[in-house]
């Protein structure tokens, strides 16, 4: 039962990544067929991001009421319907309409699945699962490329991925009874229920009352981790979008070489998460986050070196990708430990919203700044985000450590930072 559900979750994470690259991969052809400017891609992505943020914030209430299995199945079903809707859309306004369920489905399933894995599985699975997300995000451009080059058209790529999502929806519906039967193994320091099961870990995610947004934000340390998560996702999305441009305009790298190394940044994240899974349980989330930001900082330094050759910048981009790899999974996986199992769904929902806000706002912000100052500020922009993420995560570590030094007072029920133990398995 445990292995079967875990396999389904792995497939679900691949499915989460599949739609994420479709718009970008197909837009050079799509905007011509639809008769709209290239810049209109930003409208679609903003609608998707808005829906994702809203559903992330609502995920805690939905998961407690209906259960993670139902939320996951319905969310994937929404995404499947939206993708099929994209495939039959002959106008831009229809794409905008279908972008609404696209975003709503993506945010809810992301928050629900991440919290479930954080509560029920070891750190190695969190890293491997996010590696599988990268696999899905890497596959979809090839699907779009095949659809276009074979003469099927961009709509066929959306139809293929949409039907794959529909099949997964059917599998998830059948698997709903399994989600409540896998017993979590709470790490030391979490607020466990009397039977040893963490609060809110039941089949429906219930057992405790809803944690309102305002209450979750008042939990000590939540604002710190939101700032760190915002910084990380802003860093990642900015590097993905602008690295190739920086290499060409400021380091004299050939267009093809710059594109290849920009893709290596993504491959570094995907491969790095796969490798991190082998030692994540032994190193612990706190050290993975700290080491990840440090490695990204080293990569940014190499990118910024005023060398006569672009080699340090190219190497730095790969190093930065590898450093990014464990940060996202480790932040998510450490949430039940830092804030309590009963609060984790609410906090992870807010974290997802912060993540999408950072990844949505940072790239255009850099675009505006680079228009004014020049793309040479690329490594400086990344360095500021690295410093912010590292500073906020280290402040959270100190807060958690101070809380652990006062065991006699015990955790504040449902609101406090809980323990310092790293999850080991």
Image: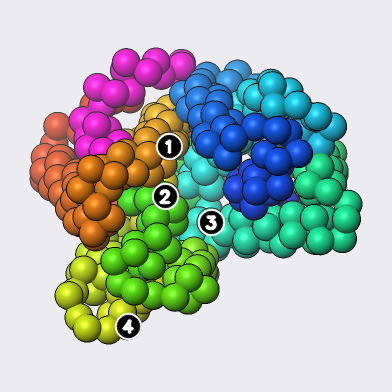
Q: Which of marks 3 and 1 is in front?
A: 1
Q: How far apart are marks 4 and 1 (CA)?
A: 30 Å
Q: How far apart are marks 4 and 2 (CA)?
A: 22 Å
- Label the magenta part by its dominant secondary structure: helix
Marks 3,2: beta carbons within 8 A: no
Disc 1 designates what residue?
A: 360
N-terminal label among 3 and 2: 3
Residue at 34% from the left image edge and 44% from the top image edge: 367
Q: Is residue 361 left or right of residue 105?
A: left
Q: Give the range drawn in magenta.
A: 206-232
Kindly indicate the quadrant of the structure image that contains residue 422. bottom left
Q: What element carries label 3?
A: helix
Q: How far apart are marks 4 and 3 (CA)?
A: 29 Å
Q: What element carries label 2?
A: helix
N-terminal label among 2 and 1: 2
Question: Within 10 Å of the Cα at label 4, are there few (<14), some (14-19), or many (20+) other Cα atoms?
Answer: some
Compared to residue 119, the image places residue 267 above or below, namely: below
N-terminal label among 4 and 2: 2
256, 232: nearer the viewer: 256
Disc 3 designates what residue?
A: 130
The numbered mark at residue 369 is none
Question: Within 10 Å of the Cα at label 3, are there few (<14), some (14-19), or many (20+) other Cα atoms?
Answer: many
Q: Which of marks 4 and 3 is in front?
A: 4
The numbered mark at residue 311 is 4
């Amino acid at each position: 039962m445990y292995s079967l559900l875990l396999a389904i979750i792995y497939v679900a994470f691949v499915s989460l990544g599949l739609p994420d690259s479709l718009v970008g991969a197909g837009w050079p052809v799509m905007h011509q067929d639809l008769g709209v400017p290239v810049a209109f891609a930003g409208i679609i992505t903003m609608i998707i991001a808005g829906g994702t943020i809203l559903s992330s914030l609502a995920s805690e209430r939905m998961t407690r009421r209906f259960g993670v299995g139902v939320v996951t199945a319905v969310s994937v079903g929404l995404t499947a319907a939206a993708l099929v809707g994209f495939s039959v859309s002959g106008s831009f306004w229809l794409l905008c309409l279908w972008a609404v369920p696209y975003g709503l489905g993506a945010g809810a399933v992301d928050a629900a699945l991440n919290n479930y894995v954080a509560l029920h599985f070891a750190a190695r699975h969190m890293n491997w699962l996010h590696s599988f997300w990268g696999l899905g995000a890497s596959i979809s451009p090839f699907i779009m490329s095949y659809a276009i080059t074979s003469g099927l058209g961009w709509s066929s790529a959306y139809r293929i991925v949409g039907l794959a999502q529909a099949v997964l929806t059917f599998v998830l519906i059948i698997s709903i009874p399994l989600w409540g039967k896998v017993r979590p193994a709470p790490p030391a320091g979490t607020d466990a229920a009397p039977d040893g099961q963490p609060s809110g870990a039941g089949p429906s995610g219930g057992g405790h009352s809803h944690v309102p947004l305002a209450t979750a934000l008042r939990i000590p340390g939540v604002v710190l981790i939101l700032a760190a998560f915002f910084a990380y996702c802003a860093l990642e999305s900015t590097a993905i979008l602008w690295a190739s441009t920086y290499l060409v305009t400021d380091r004299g790298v050939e267009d093809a070489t710059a594109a290849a190394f920009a893709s290596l940044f993504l491959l570094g994240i995907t491969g790095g998460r796969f490798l991190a899974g082998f030692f994540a349980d032994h190193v612990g989330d706190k050290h993975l986050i700290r080491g990840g930001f440090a490695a990204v900082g080293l990569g940014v330094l190499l990118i910024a070196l005023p060398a006569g050759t672009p080699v340090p910048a190219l190497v730095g981009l790969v190093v930065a990708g590898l450093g990014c790899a464990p940060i996202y999974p480790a932040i998510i996986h450490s949430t039940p430990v830092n804030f309590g199992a009963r609060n984790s769904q609410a906090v992870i929902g807010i974290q997802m919203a912060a993540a999408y806000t950072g990844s949505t706002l940072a790239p255009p912000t850099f675009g505006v700044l680079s228009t004014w100052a020049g793309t040479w500020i690329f490594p400086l922009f990344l360095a500021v985000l690295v410093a912010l993420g590292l500073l906020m995560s280290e402040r959270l570590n100190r807060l958690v450590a101070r809380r652990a030094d006062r065991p006699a007072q015990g955790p504040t029920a449902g609101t406090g930072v809980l323990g310092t133990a790293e999850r080991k398995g």
